[in-house]
Amino acid sequence: MRKWLRYFAKTLGVFAFCFVIGSWIVAGILIAPAASKVTWPTGLAYSPKDVTFPATDGVKLKGWFLPQANSTSAVVLLHGVRANRDSMLARAFWLHDLGYNVLLYDARGCGESDPAVLSFGCYETRDLLGSLRWLQMRGMTKVGCIGCSQGAATVLLASGQLPLSVRAVVAEGSYATLRDTVDDHFRMHTRLPSGYFGALAVPMAEWKLGLNMDDVSPLHEIRKLKVPLFIIGGTSDDLAPPTGTHQLYDAAACEKNLWMIEWAGHTDFFSYAEDQYKQRIGDFLRSHLWP
């Protein structure tokens, strides 16, 4: 009997050791930078400016600026997690054609911006505030923010810090709370809630980031938003579920609009429903960014 107990104890010890090491690796993967080469497409009529500007904590960010002569209205575009600015190009072309200055940049740790751990919108708020400062210094008096997924969460997390130049916000596919979205990601990839597979990985990621997951909540911060808001969600989105999208909408105390796109998952809503997107968001921006 003692022999079997010793065997069981050793097996349990090996399993626990592997679980700890695996959790540490998973935690590192969760927040690892996602650097990538970003190249402007050839053969286009647009003439962007390559720009570099600091986030409010000094992290250097790379981006493109599409200027519009005789206009002080601008839109800043925020991409999703582990993506880069080129995922926002279709929106940039459309917005520039409408007459807006457009700034699209790589969030910290993404694309060609400085390496940094990913925080799912928390520290990325410093990137957004840096981009808004850069636009203000160039005379942009009316600015709209369009964020997708992590980019949307970033804007909402910055709700109480946005300067007066920001007149409109479009949030596409934002999560409601970081704890919820981590659980949704774990369920999608492992078919288990994060309380099982992420029992150690999540606390380790929190420790590496120096934050408490429960403090990262667009659902809480959105109450501080003072400018008109347009929320977009997909009725089949597993990573930013409709329940969370409706919670965000209900929590907002500003002028607000909600568009739930039938059958859409966690996808690029611009390409998924392009004609409706251009009509709805075009009208929304025009009513708040033009004189």
Image (cartoon, rainbow, N blue to C red):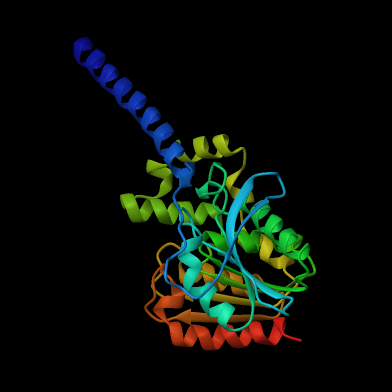
Quarter of the image where the N terminus is located: top left
- Tell whether 129 sits left or right of 36: right
Label count reads 0
Q: Nearer the viewer, residue 261 or 289?
A: 289
Q: Nearer the viewer, residue 222 or 279?
A: 279
Q: Is residue 9 above or below residue 166?
A: above
Q: Splitting the image into 4 quarters, where does residue 59 fall?
A: top right
Q: Residue at x 57, y 44 (%)?
A: 114
Query: Residue pushed farthest top?
Result: 2
Could you say where residue 243 lies in the image, as x and y percent from the top left? Answer: 49, 70
Along the line of sight, which residue is nearer the eye, 58 or 246?
58
Q: Is residue 187 above or below residue 7?
A: below
Residue 184 image offset from top left, x and y in percent:
42, 56
Q: Quadrant of the C terminus?
A: bottom right
Residue 46 point in image, percent of width and height: 53, 73
Q: Position of residue 228 (x, y in %)?
A: 69, 78
Is any part of residue 117 visible from this angle?
A: yes
Q: Residue at x 39, y 70 (%)?
A: 265
Residues 113 and 52: in front is 52
275 is higher (above) or lower (below) than 213: below
